[in-house]
Amino acid sequence: ASKAQPQSQWQDDDNQPRSIHTLDISEDDPPKLFVLPKDLSTDARIIRLPHPVNAKPCRYLVDPSRGFYEFTRVAGPSRACHSWLLAPDYSADAAVESEGNDKAGYVFRQPELLVATPIDPLFVLLPALWGVATQEWKTLGDWLSDYPGYEDLLAILRSDMSGAIEILLNDRMRAVCDILQMGSGEDTLFKLNVLMLADIVWSKAASMGKVGLPYSMEQHFVRKALELPEVSVRREDSTISAVQEGRKAADSSVIQMTSDAAEERDVQAHGPKLQKNVELSDLLRFRTAIRYLCMNYLPPSLETRVQAMYADRTYTLQRKTDLTPLDEHLARIMRLKAEAHALRSISDNISRKRGLDDDEAIEKADARKRKKEEEEAKKKNVSQGVKKLMKADTSGMQKMSSFFVKKEVK
């Protein structure tokens, strides 16, 4: 009898009941992970306010002692399939898990952080200030009451006993608005001044340019934009060799300079060029910061007004900033890129044509080679007698074909 085969470790045992484990159902509204500032006051609240660009309700953090914060979404690339496990700390130093807590943590299928970053409150007020009635004079409370979406902020203003939020908002309104005092000065009326707002955005962009842009913005909008295109120029070998020989002859007759003198010569030669590149980078960094602030914190119609002011050279010269060298340099780069693209297209066409010519030459060489091989094969197949007849002297003899020619009748 054959020996019984051992049961595989992956084979199910019919005698044992199978246990089916299922995963928990995904939640329709999963929790979000917020990163908040440290040491917030107990009066801090997360409220909804209109977004400065599209006036849609968004979450903001308001703390009477610290001001306003917006939530910036931080997440990895969409192509990266990652998930996060969020669970409490059950170490020896941590508190013991409370009884009746079934869920010990969450698995985030789409991991992202909502980081609270400071924001100037005047941007939060722009949807109300830049509305239908932009030419009217109103108090802060009237501006917020007449525009929908500020109900949470009005509730905080009414409940804030210290008045810190109201003082902060009034100070920021004075920075971008014309002021009109009513009565004994208790009521202050405001009206948006676009020029003052443009100056505020200008100063903020200058500060961003000095501190430095994030790495991704620096690489894409500054360094890549200032890169000159590479154009390959083909020179004749004879010209290069003649020039190289002339340089060698000249170098042999000149006394070698010391290393210090050579470094000083390089600094004198390249110093102005490097200084110009630094100035252009600073100007482009400043312009990138302006565009970022206008696109992310100003309503579209208001952004158009502010950008029109920045396009006026008189406005920029009054702020001691001339963007004309940057515009000229960027236009030159665009011309060089167009020329490089045209030269690359011509080079590709020449390479394709040269490839076709080479193919034709190869085909002709192959045909000659085949014909020569066929003739050599025919010569090898000729018999010895025929070879001797071919070597015989037939001078003065008529050819065989002459005997078969039809003669004319006289």
Image (spheres, helix red, strand yellow):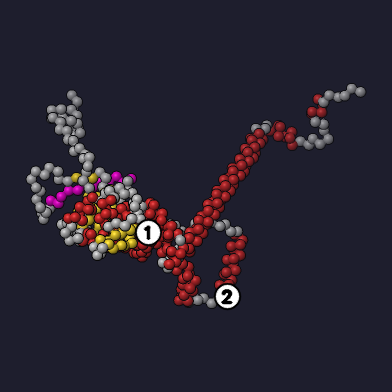
Whole-percent x and y of residue 47?
22, 51
The C terminus sits in image quarter: top right
Which residue is drawn at the image coordinates 35% and 55% (left, top)? 135
User: Does residue 116 appear in this view?
Assistant: no
Whole-percent x and y of residue 106?
19, 45
Which residue is drawn at the image coordinates 51% and 59% (left, top)? 332
Q: Earlier in the sequence, mark 2 or mark 1?
A: 1
Q: Is residue 378 left or right of residue 229?
A: right
Q: Is residue 159 left or right of residue 113?
A: left
User: Does residue 99 appear in this view?
Assistant: yes
On whether residue 87 falls in the magenta region, the answer is yes
Quick one: 401 or 210, which is closer to the camera? 210
Quick one: 124 or 335, which is closer to the camera? 124
Q: Is residue 26 above or below residue 148?
A: above
Whole-percent x and y of residue 232?
53, 56
- Residue for badge 2: 253
Quick one: 383 or 102, which is closer to the camera? 102
Would you say the magenta stretch is mainly helix, strand or loop?
Answer: loop
Mark 1: few/some/many CA within 10 Å (<14, 14-19, 20+):
some
Quick one: 326 or 383, which is closer to the camera? 326
The N terminus sits in image quarter: top left
**Gap between marks 2 and 1, in whole Å?**
68 Å
Magenta span covers which residues?
79-90
Which residue is drawn at the image coordinates 26% and 59% (left, top)? 169
Q: Quadrant of residue 371?
A: top right
Q: Residue furthest top?
A: 409
Query: Which dot, 2 or 1, sits closer to the camera?
Result: 1
Residue 106 tag number: none
Mark 2: few/some/many CA within 10 Å (<14, 14-19, 20+):
few
Label 1 sits on what residue type? Val
- Residue for badge 1: 194
Q: Quadrant of residue 28?
A: top left
